[in-house]
Image: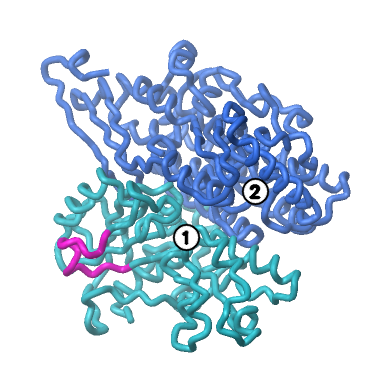
Amino acid sequence: MPHSKYKFLGDYEFIWGPVRKGVSESILFNFLSSGEELHNLEITAGYKKRNYENVLAGKRNLNEQILLIERISGLHAFAASLSFCLSVEDFFGLADKIHNNIKILRMFFAEFERIRNHIENLSEIAESTYIVVPSALYAYHAEMLKQLSQKYLNSRYLMGINEIGGVRKNLSLEDIENILDSVKSTVNKVKAVIKKNMETKSHIDRLKTTGKIDLKTAKRFRANGVAAKSAGISLDLRINRPYLLYGETNLEPVIFEDGDAFSRYMVRIGEIGQSLNIIGYCCDMLKRNGFSYTADYLSRQGEFEELKESENRNFKYGRLKHGFGYAESSEGAIFCYIKDFDGNIFKKINIKYPFENNYKLFADGTKNTMMMDFNINETSYNFSVAALDK
Amino acid sequence: MAFWTYDGLKFGIKSVKFPKENDFYDGFISSIKIDEQKCLNRTKKTMNLKCRECQLACPADAINLNNIFDSKTLGKVINVNRCIFCGLCIDACNEVAGFGGMGAINYASDLNFDIRPQNYEVKKKIFKKSLFVKHIDTGSCGACESEINALNNPYYNMHRLGVFITPSPRFADVLLATGTFTERMTEVFFNVLDNIPKPRFIVLTGSCAIFGGVFENGTAKGIDLNLSPLLNENVIVLPHCPPNPFEILNILLLIKNGGLK
């Protein structure tokens, strides 16, 4: 909303951005404040718009399109590439033919990414309330997860793992068990830090009632992901519209009703435990299904190539055909819509991240909050400007 | 709050010994290298290329197999500055391995780049004390930022080495740019650069800042080093997508200690 509607005598405007403090993404905030209190916030994005649609349309094959989609927002690389792969598999009618073990592996990595992102965000939240030791401990544990991911998957951000019809990395059951053990051990250490953090009043008091949004506002702005769950909206694609094998996991939604930074913090903590359970479930299922190597499940490539050729022959007649896929990232739902397959690539790809709605909600939620709490408020949403600008 | 002090002390020192020792973690990757002795094109001893699978698979045009025949250009088969670490060449080479190849391409873990900035003449130490770094996001995906932020965690702990992130360009010695140079951010980049006192270094961090990375096209591209404001600047390129914190730290320490080749 424009400042003129809210401006009173003594209020002043100031801008912050697009280059901000420390290491942060480029976005411009325009504040209207009377000193202590923030009356209105205008957000200007688009400084780093990379026109991903045009770039995607110029790629040579689907592998290159996956690589680019992973790099729209690097912190949500796996969830984004998963939504794209699911939409391509939907387009080619491969969805029912994917082996259950591949679906389980994808769930495993998606939850691994969620845990890493949440722990990293806990570190940022702790830093925003100026408690440095827990912030450093969280950051250290998040670093351990990144190193683990590089050790087994050759990427610290789970890039280059998904491919159409399967996963690219060849892992054994032993590797999966090792990853699970390390994640379990890391999460247990994080839980110990969380427990002590909950006893730190200066931390909890600053989170409570900060950036409060009510249910009505959250619904009006179509809040998504953690922001929605913290305001009492049960919005989780893994539960509401199960994909892969999430339907079999009997997930309970992690919901809080206060809508403040503390609720968002608690949703993240709840989801870390939930994701660890899913990873454990995935490992058990793989053992039960007699999984030994990922490479055993890549035999669909030939079938996929045939399907691609057939689509290429019918390209002129099948232009109305489209594919749709979605995945729940750590911050909310990522939707992917694809169309116009020319034999090698999809000419039209549209990806929607949860941040577009949440930014509007954030701008509204900061009204009449304290300037001092702005950093807490912002980190509790854990935005990706890259996903917003695309 | 006292228990946090106690906990912090009890947690102990977790930092690596780098740069005194190259004690990288398990699975650390700094580059992708080709073992020419295993490459089919070399073993067949003919000037005609027999296998181009890796070159065809590379999404960043980083591989030029024509360089494999000449001993002078052997090190330039994989262009380090364009490699985005996707691993597609390794997959392609391993697939060929099933048909008589030997898996010539693999990950490596050394920190050996050619990083001499342009217009930089001799080995000399410019900065006497701590090094202050200003970061600017010119269009990145967020992964490079996360890696730079990781330098503050207890594992890398760059403060122990006298390297700090500064909020103001006025105090900075190094400008760390991440991401493709979008039209709007290029203008902002030069504004920030104008405010950094000389002597100064610019580090183009990640493939996107160098040539646009996977986004390389008309609108998203790397910075043009031939632009007049950059002609007399010390520009260092730090490839990969995203570059590992060890690599970023290595570059910053080389600038600080005057060890640039």
Identity of the amino acid at label 2?
Answer: Glu
| Location of residue B209 by image quarter | bottom left
Give the CA separation, mark 1 to mark 2: 18 Å
Q: Provide residue B1's location: percent of width, then percent of height.
A: 45, 43
Residue A385 vs A23, above or below: the answer is above
Magenta region: B224-236
Q: Provide residue A60's location: percent of width, then percent of height.
A: 52, 51
Residue under pointer 1: B60
Whether residue B231 appears in magenta in the rendering, the answer is yes
Q: Residue furthest top?
A: A216
Whether residue B72 appears in magenta in the rendering, the answer is no
Q: Residue at x 66, y 22 (%)?
A: A240
Q: Nearer the viewer, residue A290 or B94?
A: B94
Residue A352 vs B249, above or below: the answer is above
Q: Provide residue A338's location: percent of width, then percent of height.
A: 56, 33
Q: Residue at x 26, y 21 (%)?
A: A40
Q: Nearer the viewer, residue B222 or A42?
A: B222
Q: In the rendered image, is residue A343 in sight?
A: yes
The C terminus of chain A lies in quadrant: top left
Chain letter corresponding to the colour blue:
A
Using the rendered image, report if marks 1 and 2 lie on a common chain: no
Q: Please, which chain is the residue tagged with disc 2 on?
A: A
Q: Colour of chain B?
A: cyan
Residue under pointer 2: A163
Q: Residue at x 22, y 60 (%)?
A: B172
Q: Residue furthest left?
A: A9
Q: Provide residue B187's location: percent of width, then percent of height.
A: 20, 48
